[in-house]
Amino acid sequence: MRTLPLIAVASAVALAALLVLSAPTPPPAQVAAKAPAPPSEFVITDVRVFDGETTWPNADVRIKDGRITAIAEQLEWPGELAVVDGSGKTLLPGLIDAHVHSWGDARQQMLRFGVTTALDMFSDPAQLQGFRRDRESLATTDRADVWGAGALVTAKGGHGTQFGMAVETYDDVAQAPALVESRIAEGSDFIKFVVDDGHAYGDHHDLPTLDAPRIEALLAATGASKQMAVAHVAQVETGLAVIRAGAEGLVHVFSDRLASSEEVAVMAESGAFVIPTLTVISGLGGQSIGQSISEDADLSPLLDAAQRDTLRAAFPPQFQRATHVSNGFGNVAALQRAGVDILAGTDAGNPGTAHGASMHGELELLVKAGLTASEALRAATALPAKRFELLDRGRIAVGHRADMLLVDGDPTVEIGATRRIVTIWKNGTPVSRAPVAKAADKAGPQLAKVDSPFDGKTMETSQGQLWAPSLDSIIGGKSSAVLALQDEGNTSFMQVGGTVAIGAPYPWAGAALLVGKPPMSPTDASRLTELSFRLRGDGRKLLVMLLTGNNSQAPAMRRVTSTKEWQTHRLALADFQGADLTRLRAVAITASLPAGEFAFDLDDFELR
Amino acid sequence: MNSQMMSAPAPMMLTRIYLREAGYEFLRLLRTPAFALPTLIFPLVFYVMFAIVLPGRWGEFDKSAYLLATYGVFGIMGPALFGFGVGLAMERENGLLALKQVSPMPTGAYFFAKIAMSQCFGLAVVILLSIAGVGFGNVEITLDRWLLLVAVLLLGTLPFCALGLWMGTLLKGQTAIAIVNLVYLPMSVLSGLWMPLFAFPQLLQKAAVIWPSWHLAQLALGVVGQVEGVRYGLHVGVLLVTTVLFLSLAAMRLRGR
């Protein structure tokens, strides 16, 4: 049949045509990668400039290779230079948050909201070398630069030791020089120490803290090593005491009472600075601005899920006292009037805050406390740069780093304009502001009630989930734990025993229930309300942790105390601050500091 | 062909003949472990290894869902290429074909049997993969999407039946096994069935369009939702034309004898 060859030829031709049409289109990622690199030299024209100290109503600013090369009312430049039209807008130096605690992706979050530099007042000292390397470079980056205190200096059992991070404590005056040397060796840019006995939060709070001889010895040692020393205080008395002894500044405003005019005068004469951290003072006074930040029309679209979680969180009720607000704001007003340098810092990382976004809230609170908008802007730019000797930042001036913020409107008159960010430059390059989409943001499958009576032969729940040892070895720790089923008379229970060893920043050891299938996958526990269990132990305080959200999120915790006799504990899931119950991965009951051996028994565990 | 000289049997008998031939073909294949086992087991074993024991993501692809679609394609290709390619070649060589041709069995029954068997084994592989994927690999797929996937894959055996048929008319006996493997395995890899093509050099990525398995894989990946913007019409068109092309080439060879 002759038609067959015809069919064969026709289909061959048709196939060839279709194949040409089928050429796969390049995936969008490749197309995006071909976008042109931002220009290394450009001019911002006709823009109002707040240069850190004063305002230029209309100026041109020229940037080259990451630095500001010229600023004048009228500049001339070669025609082919890229131009950014600044009319109707204001150019500010990149904001400097003078009090943060940085971990995880804090630095990226900060930069997205216009904070280009931050002063870290206590976090993992292992980060310090990286901080130094990054801030000395002018390379394009996606994160803020940080100067850090590294580990803080505090008394044994004092404020700073409750976070589970292993901290070398300052117990004897003879330690002072060696302590300062260790901090310098680790890379601390300044020394932060703590004088806080907890009384500002209520009389029943009693924390060990540094006494006068140790404070003097420490300040002598920092003076000898030419290191700046700043102090965490909560009370007027201690604030004045450390300033008189020679500390350069306070990293919180005292809020236990209003300072007298004599006391304010002492502060003014000393030349010390104060970082009020009104954001957390408000939180401690029950007036957290976390909610208003997360609902702000200009800030909200850029917040990621983790930031919404921390903004929603609050300080434990037993720390809150309404007078913190009136005292704190009143003291700031008085100190400002007396000429004390006030620096803007959020204490971000704490409940009710979000890195970067909270800075705009802090500026608003400073204005509420009595600073003018320009004074608040100066407190977030030129002033911290001056006091901490951040030589090439905090100002729009020739030779300074091109870390800048272009906002819509005039923040020197209306401080809220800082939130209307048009462009952020870091090291002379525009910064992308979209939060990185995290793949694991989906809620998990619905979790039905879980119960674990430990009555069978295995340490499994009635729904088939497993208990497993939970150890800090995943972050490099050395603690150990062993789980075993024990029989006693008619009942059986799970015995958890082991050793908490110092090794990781947050030591822990205990037992974890992996509620998802496969283990560690997220589940939606939002319909459940309570967790309960029977506990018997050696009197230790244990941590009940909910591991939620994505893998790097810190667990939400509550403390329970184990007793020598069996006791039933019931904890409402809603009380676990910061937990994302739509993505619950595991529940853990663990022992933490103090280091040493531990043992506790668990029975009749239920999540319902 | 000789069957043209036969008077057409009654319809009832015809159906019985078709089904019988299919049944015997099935038995024969089942009794050929060298065919049955690799066809059913290899895709499943590889899937378990690469999608379940080593789960995760490749960029924006979810491994267990991606590989369910692509190993599904891999799985249906085998029976079609080997059933026709090797089957026909061997039957030509050992004289079984000639025997069937002189028998009263209509030619249609011969092809129906082979196609039906490809589909049968193909379906078995897809079901095994689906059990593994949904049961152990956390693949989330609605019932109607899964049925669509099965339909796409089963219809997709036809181009490979045609390709196998054409190869079967060209190759002889034992060499057929080697040659069919030489086509089957590289084509599968180069179509992105074992891992996504973004891992490959640009040239190979662009050349993927020449493989019918690449087109079928795109259809399958679109159905399971791993790839956006699939041009269903284009890929179906390519597969259809491929089928016609190889069928006509094979028919030319068979008639020419």
Image: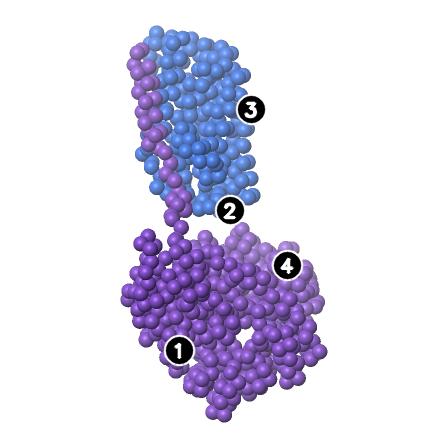
Label 4: element kind? loop
Q: How far apart are labels 4 and 3 at the CA level?
A: 51 Å
Q: Is residue A81 visible?
A: yes
Tag 3: Cα neighbours inside 10 Å, few (<14), some, or many (≥20)?
A: few
Q: Quadrant of residue A441?
A: bottom left
Q: Which residue is the site of mark 3?
A: B34
Label 3: element kind? helix
Tag 2–tag 3 contact (CB < 8 Å): no
Residue at screen point 66% across, 71% down: A181
Give the mark, 2 or 3, whose residue is nearer the N terminus. 3
Tag 1–tag 3 contact (CB < 8 Å): no
Q: How far apart are labels 4 and 2 at the CA level?
A: 24 Å
Q: How far apart are labels 4 and 1 at the CA level?
A: 45 Å
Q: How far apart are labels 1 and 2 at the CA level?
A: 52 Å
Residue at screen point 41% across, 33% down: B206
Q: How far apart are labels 2 and 3 at the CA level?
A: 33 Å
The purple chain is: A
Give the residue type at disc 1: Glu
Chain letter for the residue marked with disc 1 in the picture: A
Tell me the tag on residue A375: 1
Task: Tell whether B39 sits left or right of B220.
Answer: right
Chain letter for the residue marked with disc 3 in the picture: B
Residue at screen point 51% across, 59% down: A137
Chain letter for the residue marked with disc 2 in the picture: B
The blue chain is: B
Give the residue type at disc 2: Gly
Give the residue type at disc 4: Gly
For residue B244, above or below residue A593: above
Give the residue type at disc 3: Ala
Q: Quadrant of residue A216?
A: bottom right
Q: Which residue is the site of mark 4?
A: A476
Tell me the tag on residue B56: 2
